[in-house]
Amino acid sequence: MASLNKVMLIGRLTDNPEPPRVLPNSGSTVVKFRFAVSRNKKNAQTGQWDNDPNPLFIDCEAFSRPEFGKLTELISQYCKKGSQIFVEGRLQLDQWDDKTSGQKRSKHKLVVERIEFLDTKNDGAGGGGGGSFNRSATPTAVVSSSGGYSSPPQDDMGSMDDDGPPPSSNGTTEEIPF
């Protein structure tokens, strides 16, 4: 029997990510953040796009293993409240007993496996442009658990600004292993 657990969303961070913390047994790091996704609809009478009055808020966790360890570091460094990002991952169910009421509680969360920073340097809606790079409408960086790292040519290294790593020279997104 086949099964698939894959989620792909574009939205904005509702707050700055929590500081990364090291997990005691594995040495891996984890960073948690909250993400908001909405579904805007076109108004048939006015032709304008109406904002969704009920956005979906999703708790997210990203992990980095010591041997690859970049995903949590890059999320902490470049994602800020309001940053627009694309996340790809899987759903996971957390269950626990509520300490105050003793009732069983549960929630679904998104375990992030890949992220793209979508803000541009001049994009005003990004909570200060966290994770923004010097390119226009194209995605600016890709961080994933699989794939290789394609570094830009040496002469492009001078274009790196304080806001993040340099874009690739061919205008495509970069794959950075975590």
Image (cartoon, helix red, strand yellow):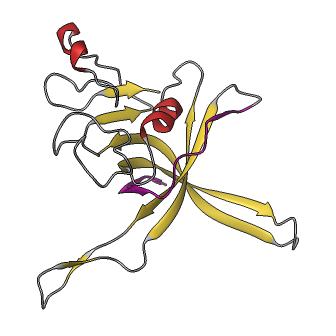
Where's residue 19, x and y in %? 61, 39
Depth order, front residue of 9/31: 31
Query: Could you say which quadrant of the image residue 45 lies in?
Result: bottom left
Where's residue 132, x and y in %? 31, 39
Where 118 sits versus 162, above or below?
below
Q: Residue placed at 32% from the left, 72% from the top?
A: 39
User: Image check: 63 left or right of 77?
Assistant: right
- Magenta span: 1-23
Specify whether residue 2 is in view. no
**Is 26 within the magenta?**
no
Depth order, front residue of 28/157: 157
> Extreme top residue here?
154
Where 167 sits versus 105, above or below?
above
Dominant secondary structure of the residues highlighted in magenta in the image: loop
**Is 16 within the magenta?**
yes
Where 132 sits versus 50, above or below?
above
